[in-house]
Image (cartoon, coloured by chain):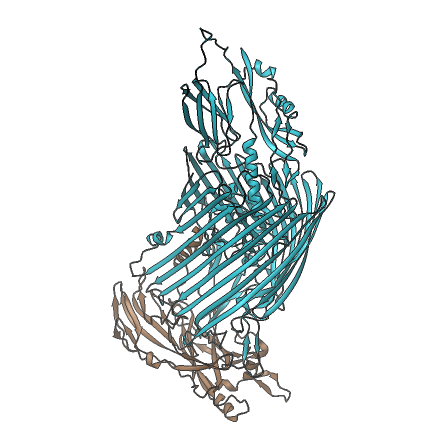
Amino acid sequence: MRTRLLAPLLLLSAACSMPQDNPTQVTDLRVLALSLESPELMAPSCDTRDPRNAFVYATPLTLRALVADPEGAGRDISWELLACAAVADRTCEDEENRLVVATGTMKAGELELTQPFGTLTLPQKLDPAGNPVPLLTEVLAKDTYKGLGGLRMPLVLHVKAGDEEIFAQKLMVFSCRFFPEQQQNVTPVLPGLRLNGAPWGEGSVPELSGAGPFELEPEPYAELEEPYVVPSFELKPVQLQESWKFAWYVTGGRMSLEESGGTDVDGTPSRPGVQWEPTSKPPSGELTFYVVVRDGRGGSSWYVRRARYTP
Amino acid sequence: MLRLLLLLPLLLPALAAAQVEGARREEVDAGVHVPVLTKAPELLEFVQAPWPEGAADAGVTGAEVKLAVTLAADGSVAEAAVTAPAGNGFDEAAVDAVKRFRFSPAEVDGVPAPVTLEYVYRFQLQVVPEPTVSADGGVPAPPPAKLVGEVIARGSRSRVPGAVVRCGEEPEAPEAVTDDDGKFQLEVPPGPCPLRVVAQNFQPYSQDETLAPGETTEVRLYLVPRAIGFETTVRGKRDKKEVVRRTVERAELQKVPGTFGDPIRVVQNFPGVARTPFGLGQLLVRGANPNQTGTYMDGVEVPLLFHLGGGPSVINSEFLDRIDFFPGGFGARYGRAVGGIVDVATRKGASDTLHGVAKVDLLDASAFVEAPLADGVSVAAAARRSYVDLLLPAFLPKSEDGSTLLVLPRYWDYQVRVDFGRSRKDASRQGSSYYVMAFGSDDQLTLVSSSPSQPRDVTIDTRTLFHRVKGDWTYRNGRFTSVLTPFLGYDLVKTGFGAISFDADRYNAGLREDLSLEVNETVTARAGLDLIYEHTEGRAKLPFIAAAQYVGFPGAEPKVQFQELVQVFNVFDAAAYLEADFKLGPVTVTPGVRATAAHVRRKDMQSVDPRLWVRWAVRDGTAVKASAGLYAQTPDGGQLAKPPYGNPNLTFERSFQSSLGVEHKLTDVLNVDLTGFYNNRYDLVTFPGTRTVNADGSVTQLPSENRGLGRAYGLELMLRHEVTKNFFGWLAYTFSRSETRRRGGPDWALSNFDQTHILTAVGSYRLPLGFELGARFRYVTGNPRTPLEHPWDKYSADGNRFYGTNGDTNSARLPAFNQLDIRIDKNWLFDNWTLDTYLDVQNVYNAPNTEFLTPDYRYRSQVPITGIPILPVLGVKGSF
């Protein structure tokens, strides 16, 4: 009993004292977010013979990446965008079922690429007629749900700089209107940010000093969270509503939470705001803050803000 | 004039103790043939040993020779061996005299049988004064004085029967023997009376009284036990057909260091049991999962043995008679388990007088009382209540930022047992005896966590409660024994987590009938029924579950539609068993079979499990044993719900268990046992089950399936020093390998708790002045772990989380575990009660044992989470 009672406490204390990287501190090469515009393509019909579906899936989509590299001092970052068939293939290592969509070199910041991802084909894999197999066909073949709830095509951004290498996966959702009330997802965009209760616009660089605390929170956004419907395994509608989550990053100090928002499994909503903590070795000078919003169904966007801090 | 006086050694207390133990055995060993001493031998002819000449020359005035005396079935002394010599010729004199003793035949199970007794032959040289003659020579003697009283064991209020009380030390001095209530009465000449009391297992007692003519003087005499703490009793050896059955007696149960006096945790120190992290109370037996080892209390299956899953056991340690632990190859009487069996046996209440125990430590307080209610009726009762929920908040870290962390565990348990039907003086053990027992436990845990550094406040409430009422009717007639055990029970499980709730009520009833018949000297047959019926009503309020009811999206935490679920189902599990011992000279062959028919919800399943045990007594004290058999475990009814909550096609988990071993008795108190085993488990329930896309596009996701495979093999060594007056201990070593795989899945891999070497050394020694010192040392190979490789970061932008790149499953290991625990007891003996304080220190040298590794958020490296640091616990126990 004694040990049983103490065990969780010991774990808690251990967790609090682990000498580990803090995920909110951005120092080295990081892919902080990937987004697709639009985050979902919804075909008007779930009948695969409906010609309108192919038209919808051929819509060009824009992939955006938020890449940070504070210690890289502006170095070149090589990148390649891969697409593959299996969701579990987080690095697109299955060469038979992947293709390189694009490659290039970038600096830290944002990367933007537009492609009709729904029409990608696998040149190394031919159908009986000798035509390259559509990647979406292989995505369907690899999907253990066989398309129920939509197909998720993995897009993997592979970035490399120095000895750092990251594979970052984003799922593109191709769905169909299974229930009439289903609507295509739209990208979640925050109305704005507040710092210590005051609006924090893109151009403003507020001065911060002292030990804080410094409160960061999104502007009220509840009305923007969309209700949506997904089919259950028994093909009945399940009513859901988006509950946005926010990931917070900073180039100096750290955030009190890595992620805020969302709704617990028991239905309890979480706090959307966080605190920035200068830490015991406070940074000075200009800091970059990032907040990434995710709607939980593939949609995401972000804000980048700057502030000047003096201890 | 010098006159030799031999103080008569006393057998009666030891034999009485043997009878009490026998009574316990009868009641707790239902169905398993256990020899019971039904008639104690009585000393019919005492032979006085001569005072050795050499001793007189050496000026020795007294000596004690301790002997192990083996009586033949006719009561003659077959062997007398000195176990504690005195030298100076006393040993030879004592052996020579004892060999000429004559006893009435002892009877075991109503039949004359050989037994072994401990006997102390005491020599004492006395100076006997010359008799004096009164001056007038004709005056009539004054009226005698009367001395009445009772003899009590100091510190426990136990009455001492069979003690010899003498007024004077001369051979012709008046003497009396105390009755069953420890009372005596003497008529003696008035005047000085040098009271002398001797009793087996007690120190000699003397007290001077002056008695007035014609008056009655009452005295109460407190004898000091020779051993405080460890008990030594004469008891019949239990037949053992299983290759391995480890039995822990009461004296060991409460004193093993590192267990905090939790008796059932002692089992974790035996061979074949893997170490659990953080000292949790699970039993990992020969590669099996914790839920694959059955737990019984007096033959009735109980849902849990430990409070809050790994805390103190749910039965008061004072209530225990012993624990039988079968790591495998258990008898056909047991079933519903593919791992091992733990059977906790309770004891009947005291039949002499009121006794009790109160115990207090940092976490809980408990009390135990036992007393006779009438002749042949005794009661024992115990209760415990925790108060750690009141103390814990004081020790939890305080936060200046408004954080709150409350962990409020509350638990209580109770046990009541009433025995009746057999007069205290009825030593025949024949006919009927009964007892009724009620026991239960309630665990509640509330966790409240709130902090700005966590995304949300958390409140969790859980409750687990059970009650059992069982009856026991034992009937003996010659070599036939019947034990009927009906029981009723109620279980409650309740969980609340925000808007989520889950609660289930389970009503159960069961019946056991265990029959045993010793057909003749060659054949003993056992048979029985084991029936259980369960009715469960479960209610839940849950959100729709992603991946179980709809396709989720990585990282999503949406507001989800809730559903209310109601499940009502029945389970009927009936088993019949039959086994028989065939004694063919030195070889005993025991074939057995257990047949099970279960109706779980709407599914019927049957299993017939043959088992075989062979035991070859190579020579006295040495035996080779082997076993092989099939075992089946019925799945829980809740697991057979419709998808997505269950799999209605689940069936028995099964195992084949085999073992081969040898045991050898090195000395009277030291024995060694070496056993090899191979277990093959199959049809194990694994999670999750398969996912099937149906023709209409719907999906069937099974949460579980019978696809698990497991195999374990190894060697177990047990070197054990039985409980003696001053010492008990054992050295347990296991060398084993345990592997698992999923049918249709990857190849065999080490199971998560595979531990190649498990070494446990336990010892406890009684020191002078009421001190006892115990120690436990453990060395265990580190658990397997899957190595983390880091060629690059893998990040899911949708779920906002990283993934690791792992090496082969369980292809590396954590560092080896080593730990020393020490326990110090100090007993204070008062006239009517005993105070015991103990300090149990875990991890004395503060070894930083790694229990598991946790990665950083990018899975680039891992840091160790260490186990319990040095942890002293102080406790106080008073008993009377």
- On-image quarter of the C terminus of chain B: top left
Instruction: Using the image as rendered, state which of residue B190 and residue B871 is in the foreground.
Output: B190
- Which residue sits at x=38%, y=60%? B446
Q: Is residue B703 above or below residue B58?
A: below
Q: Position of residue B756 (x, y in %)?
A: 59, 52
Q: Is residue B855 visible?
A: no
| Total numbered labels placed on residues in the image | 0
* Horizontal side of residue B530 vs B261, given as left or right: right
Instruction: Using the image as rendered, state which of residue B88 and residue B538 is in the foreground.
Output: B538
Q: Position of residue B306 (x, y in %)?
A: 48, 53
Looking at the colours in the rendered structure, which chain would you say is drawn in cyan?
B
- Which residue sits at x=39%, y=56%? B409
Of the chain colours in the picture, the one used for chain A is brown
Instruction: Using the image as rendered, state which of residue B429 and residue A169 is in the foreground.
Output: B429
Q: Position of residue B440 (x, y in %)?
A: 46, 54
Q: Which residue is the extreme one toward the right?
A: B584
Q: Which residue is the extreme one toward the bottom?
A: A51
Question: Which of the 4 image quarters holds residue B109?
Answer: top right
Q: Is residue B698 above or below residue B716?
A: below
Instruction: Using the image as rendered, state which of residue B59 and residue A273 is in the foreground.
Output: B59
Q: Position of residue B455 (x, y in %)?
A: 36, 67
Q: Is residue B450 above or below residue B122?
A: below
Q: Is residue B95 visible?
A: yes
- Which residue sits at x=54%, y=12%? B2
- Which residue sits at x=48%, y=8%? B133
* Horizontal side of residue B509 vs A311, given as left or right: right
